[in-house]
Amino acid sequence: MSFSWDFVAAIVLFLALCSSFLVVFTSSSTALREGIAQGEEQRASLLQADLLLKTCFPEGVAYCENGFLHSHVAHPQANLSFESGFCAKRVVLQNGGLEVFGACA
Amino acid sequence: MRLKSKSFASFEALLSLLFAVAAFSLILPSFSSRPSYSHLNAFQLAQDFAEASLASPRLRGEIISFKNGVAGAEESLAGEYAGVLEKLGDYCLEMRVEGKRLEANCVLAHSQRVSARRMAFDGEDFFEIEFSLYFS
């Protein structure tokens, strides 16, 4: 039985490939998981902002009159301020002027 | 004879390695793709600008004045939009109405654009107005 260098080379290549795949796969999957979590946060903020914009004050920020919701018009008493960090921002009318309204996840 | 057989096997191993690396590099971009809602948010903002601008009697009047070439209307509108864009982030707003063009906060070059169009009435005729938001 003779010693085969081809067999050793194949084993070394296989191990090198496996280890590099494991390293890249781990780091890529971590980055992907963080990206998906960030995307989910964005989606939640956008939905929250849209919902508040389409719900009458005081539950939401929309100005309603006799059951009619005025599109993109915020109630004069609605609080449009938002915190720092990722917030979905929308443009609304309040007291006749353009204002920025934000909803944070 | 033995030496020839050994070099042939190594070439096969090298070829396999090259194929494996090529396949791996093809799969890799799918791991790095991230979902983003920035395009959707910009589209919502462009719609907001169009809707809110025409819902306000004062802004609608200023837009009609700008369309008719009234002096001072462009500066007033650009100032109003620039104040809002400052709070929104790095966006550039362009408004087009009957061949006239107004820009606000357009300092940097942006790669993406979304638009919202509306029809409005100036008391005599209908006219089309387009709001475009540029972002990166």
Image: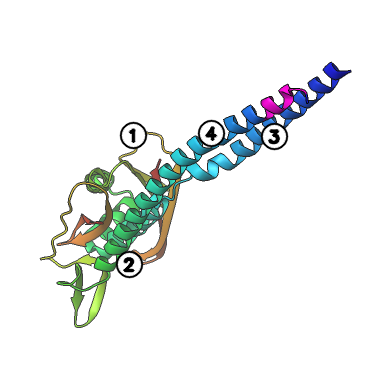
Are tags 4 and 2 found on a single chain? no
Distance of label 4 from label 2 (alpha carbons): 73 Å
Q: Secondary structure at mark 2?
A: loop
Circle 4 marks a residue in which chain?
A
Residue to which mark 4 is pinned: A19
Position above or below: A25 against B35: above
Residue to which mark 3 is pinned: B19
Q: Secondary structure at mark 1?
A: loop
Residue B49 visible to an observer of this rendering: yes
Three-letter residue code for mark 3: Phe
Distance of label 1 from label 4 (alpha carbons): 48 Å
Three-letter residue code for mark 1: Val
N-terminal label among 1 and 3: 3
**Residue at 53% across, 33% down:** A19
Circle number at residue B123 = 2
**Residue at 18% across, 78% down:** A65
Circle 2 marks a residue in which chain?
B
Residue to which mark 1 is pinned: B107
Callout 1 touching callout 3 (CB < 8 Å): no
Mark 4 or 2: in front is 4
Span of residues in magenta:
A2-10
N-terminal label among 2 and 1: 1
**Residue B13 image offset from top left, x and y in percent:** 72, 29
Q: Is residue A75 magenta?
A: no
Q: Which sits in the foreground, B74 or A69?
A: A69
